Amino acid sequence: MKKAIILLGLLLLLIVGCTQEKMEGGPCSYQTYDAIATITAVNGSEVTFTIEMVDEVTEEWHISWLDSYGDNEFTETIDFELEVGKRKWLEVDLITEGTCSPWIFDLDVNDKWVDDTDPPPQ
């Protein structure tokens, strides 16, 4: 009888443990990097762009992210006008702690367009 109760308890624990959803969100921290966005397409309020990192990326996970996604095009919804071919300063936030979005792009960080002689905006 004692073995049956223990076995039933373990079985119940396995069922409950396997059906709980993974909790996401909570307090998250990010490392912010300066980058340049090159606009490759505009469709209404959606803009597609590539990124070129300006700041040196040193954290291992962030280097891995850049190796995997850095050459990709990204799409964001914006509420201001951009033109294909333009280059704009961009802030890239890469997660350092928590389970929120692994990256956040801020194309609206300022109204500064990239000129080859411009340093990143402060």
Image: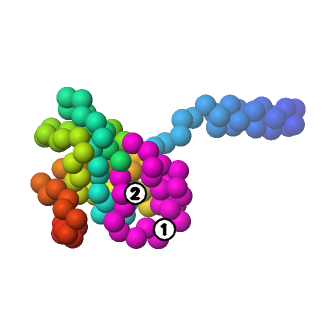
- Percent x, y of residue 27: 38, 55
Q: Range of the magenta residues?
A: 51-73
Q: Nearer the viewer, residue 81 or 100?
A: 81
Task: Identify the residue shown where x is 47% and y is 60%.
Answer: 62
Q: CA distance from mark 1 to mark 2?
A: 10 Å
Quickly name the residue at label 2: 94
Asked if the stretch drawn in magenta spans residue 69, the answer is: yes
Question: In the rendered image, which residue does mark 1 sit on?
Answer: 59
**Which amino acid, mark 2?**
Leu
Amino acid bearing label 1: Glu
103 is higher (above) or lower (below) than 30: above
Q: Where, by quadrant of the figure, is residue 76 drawn?
A: top left
Query: In the visual, does 30 lie left or right of 122?
Result: right
Q: Position of residue 118 (x, y in %)?
A: 19, 68
Q: What residue is drawn where x is 48% and y is 68%?
A: 59
- Number of other residues with Cα within 10 Å of mark 2, as a class: few under 14, some 14 to 19, many 20 or more: many
Quick check: is 43 in the magenta stretch? no
